[in-house]
Image (cartoon, grey):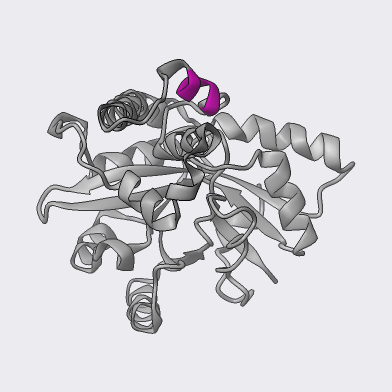
Amino acid sequence: MKADLHVHSCYSNGFFHPKELLSLATAQEINHLAIVDHHTFAGIEAVKEAVKEVFFESPVNLIEGIEISAFDLKRQKHVRVLGYNLSNRSYIKQLCRPLLHFQTNQTLFKLKKLQAEGYHLKEEELWKEAEKATALYPCHLYRLLKKRGYGTQMDHTFYQKLMTAEEVSDNRKKINVYDAIEAIKYGGGLTVLACPGKFDNYDLIPELASFGIDGLEKYHPAHRIRDLKILSDLIKTYHFSCFGGSDFHGIRGTTGFGRTLITDAREFPDQLLYN
């Protein structure tokens, strides 16, 4: 069994269309694939249409999801929350609307900084790069820079710097992690703490367990052996469901797709078997 429960499409900050992600999953014989775009479900219908175009009946179990950028106010740390199989999306859409607007403003701020540094870029070109996306992201800036001939000056390190560059400060747009979880639960979805090792969210987990979170993302490219051991113990202690995936965006082409998977059927969350 192969399950990748964490990939992103061009409808947020990924480089690949859902149809291409589906084809990649099929080629790698991945059985379960979840597209969890940032703050949007826009790619979901595209996935369903892709199934009709590529297959009469898809061999891949396509799982609907979303990723929310939240904040642990108590510890002042970033938190990522994943939501799966929401039957009602209205609550989470309302929560995400200002996040999408804020993300666009952040990216435009970075564009202006690059323009001030001498990069010849236009805002309308950036919007064209975003095309299907529901907000502007640094990946769109990165792609525009390469198209405008700045490719020789860039590598993955440059992209990471672009991702973490100084941003507009606006604490009002920091969504409380409990609000994100609550919105997903109101929608009938499964709530999962994403990549806790990456953001060092371990102290938060007992509190989330009391709040009723459903699972932890054990498998993630940022997690090391130590993280896997800690998360295995936490999953057992709190009777969480196990989740995991590649967090694929596509900045390096298809490299990285399917590199981090759930491969043990005993670990796959039963709640996702039936969509």
Q: Does the magenta stretch include residue 140?
A: no
**What quarter of the picture does the N terminus occupy?**
bottom right
Q: Does the magenta stretch include residue 126?
A: yes
In front of the other: 86 or 223: 223
Taking 20 as reference, is 111 above or below it?
above
In front of the other: 260 or 137: 137
- Quarter where residue 102 is shown: top left
Q: Residue at horizontal 33%, vertical 44%?
A: 162
Q: Residue furthest right?
A: 56
Q: Taking the image as drawn, is residue 156 in sight?
A: yes
- Quarter where residue 270 is shown: bottom right
Q: Residue at horizontal 39%, vertical 72%?
A: 223
Q: Residue at horizontal 42%, vertical 19%?
A: 122
Taking 125 as reference, is 216 above or below it?
below
Direction from residue 74 to residue 245 in the image, left or right: right
Q: Taking the image as drawn, is residue 177 in sight?
A: no
The part of the chain drawn in magenta is 125-129
